[in-house]
């Protein structure tokens, strides 16, 4: 019969999360910016309106940029 080999699971138990609380807050801010941009574009409902032509696209692109930044941001290393 074959011998059973037991593997110890205590090798690396200190796993850290990829995102921190700060990353999640930045993600929520980015999603909120996108939502607000589309909402004010919908509420103005004009083709030649100032808000729907200039303000909303800036908010939407800013929201996407915020999300990319939140995903790419590394957590700060702790000084021990």
Image (spheres, rainbow, N blue to C red):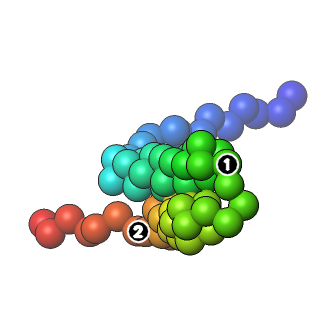
Q: Please say if the residues under marks 2 and 1 sit with CB atoms less than 8 Å apart.
A: no
Res. 47 visible in picture? yes
Q: Which residue is depicted at the point 55% across and 54% down? A: 37
Q: Quadrant of residue 10?
A: top left
Q: CA distance from mark 2 to mark 1?
A: 40 Å
Q: Quadrant of residue 23?
A: bottom left
Asked if residue 32 is positioned above or below residue 53 in the image, the reply reads above
Horizontal relation, residue 45 to residue 65: left or right: right
Q: Which residue is depicted at the point 67% across and 66% down? A: 48
- Few, some or many C-alpha atoms within 10 Å of disc 2 (few <14, some 14-19, many ≥20)? few
**Mark in front: 2 vs 1:** 1
Outermost residue to the left? 80
Q: Which residue is mark 2?
A: 74
- Few, some or many C-alpha atoms within 10 Å of disc 1 (few <14, some 14-19, many ≥20)? few
Which x, y percent locates residue 51? 54, 62
73 vs 61, nearest the viewer: 61
Which numbered marker is on residue 29?
Answer: none
Which x, y percent locates residue 30? 49, 55
Which numbered marker is on residue 45?
Answer: 1
Q: Quadrant of the C terminus?
A: bottom left
Disc on the earlier residue, 2 or 1? 1
- Which type of secondary structure does the marked residue at label 1 adopt? loop
Which x, y percent locates residue 19? 44, 53
Q: Which residue is depicted at the point 76% across and 33% down? A: 3
């Amino acid at each position: 019969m074959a011998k059973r080999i037991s593997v110890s699971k205590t090798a690396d138990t200190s796993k850290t999360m990829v995102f921190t609380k700060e990353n999640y807050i930045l993600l929520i801010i980015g999603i909120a910016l996108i939502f607000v941009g589309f909402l004010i574009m919908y509420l103005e409902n004009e083709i030649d309106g100032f808000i729907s032509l200039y303000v909303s696209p800036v908010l939407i692109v800013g929201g996407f940029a915020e999300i990319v930044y939140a995903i790419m941001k590394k957590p700060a290393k702790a000084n021990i």
